[in-house]
Image (cartoon, coloured by chain):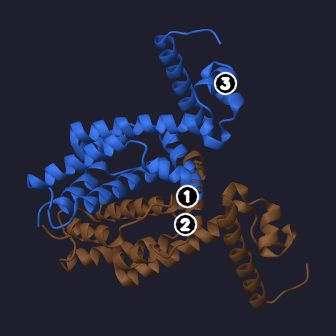
Chain colours: A brown, B blue
Amino acid sequence: MPKVSAAHRDERRRQILDGARTAFAEHGYEGATVARLEQAIGLSRGAIFNYFPDKWELFYALAVEDQQRAGMLWLEHGFDGLVRHLGDENPEWIGVYLEVSRMLRTIPELRERWAERNVDLDVKLAAHLTKLQADGVYRSDLDIETLGHFLGVVLDGLIVQRGAGFPVDIEGTLELVRSALAPK
Amino acid sequence: MPKVSAAHRDERRRQILDGARTAFAEHGYEGATVARLEQAIGLSRGAIFNYFPDKWELFYALAVEDQQRAGMLWLEHGFDGLVRHLGDENPEWIGVYLEVSRMLRTIPELRERWAERNVDLDVKLAAHLTKLQADGVYRSDLDIETLGHFLGVVLDGLIVQRGAGFPVDIEGTLELVRSALAPK
């Protein structure tokens, strides 16, 4: 293998991830065959799997990126900002998450690694929620885990409805979430 | 075709639906081939498709049953009773719903029919929510559609987390939902 610069490697990695995202969105996880990944990415399977050992690792890398982006939106623009952004998300791509949830359920190792895909971000989000609670924005009669879990449930509910093509009432949902979390 | 009694037809229909539910839960929607459906049901494809024209109609009939059962739980035991029941639901079977959400998104006719699979029940649930609002149990500054949509989002969020095998905090979620819906 010829030596390649770090910049070249980063660029290739980006090309592979962008193409894979397109292929997954268009064909679904199972439907994104190696031939379709090659076509969407514009590289041979040898080149692709030189960067990512298998299809799951490709999807996992995209999920890590998504979660980092979502986490940044949450930290910078609040839960409301994150939810409003969901309205712009591609339903086709959301569908891939729904598709892989079966794999997460049936393969415990995947599920464990999935839950830990951004440990640093989890720590930051917990600190964010703790601060909102300490500042009296969020209620303090329930613990942070319960509040965080609830917000995750609402997010997943919005995602699954959007992923199935149903209209989503973003602002109504946000109003109700604010009431749920407000100090008693 | 020999004449069969209505009771016999009902029994056969029940046998087909029960077997199909087992096959879908075990193999997923796509994975439940006609051969696997035949095996789980214990009848030939000819007999099965005499009662249901295709695989989607089999799944649709099961989804109608599920929704009727969920609607009855909701009406009789409240939203809390319905959500507590979710904890007993088979995650394998939940996974089939996540799998078909792709079909709902990509096939508009399916999505429309899906949304209208129990119109009578929708009317009853709307009346139930309207009564809770009139009785001052639910807030009246938001309309019934917004409240109902929010409860649907929370349900779907719990379902997707359970379908992916993650632990679900039923009681914490219900406490937050009660606060969300309480009069201001």
What kind of residue is marked 3?
A: Glu
Per the image, the residue denoted by label 2 is A91
Q: Nearer the viewer, residue A162 or A2?
A: A162
Q: Please tell me if label 1 and label 3 are on a single chain.
A: yes
At label 1, counting other C-alpha atoms closer than 10 Å, the crowd grade (few under 14, some 14-19, many 20 or more) is many
Front: mark 1 or 2: 1
Q: Are marks 3 and 2 on the same chain?
A: no
Residue at the spot 91% in from the left edge and 83% down from the top edge: A2
Residue A121 visible, this angle: yes
Tell me: A20 left or right of A95.
right
SS of the residue under disc 3: helix
Q: CA distance from mark 1 to mark 2?
A: 8 Å
Q: Residues within 10 Å of mark 2 (few under 14, many from 20)?
A: many
Q: Which residue was labeled with disc 3?
A: B38
Give the Cα separation between the discs numbered 1 and 3: 28 Å
Task: Give the CA distance from mark 3 to mark 2.
Answer: 34 Å
Picture coordinates of residue B35, whole percent (x, y) = 71, 28
Q: Are marks 1 and 2 in contact (CB under 8 Å)?
A: yes
Residue A157 vs residue A62, the one in the foreground? A157
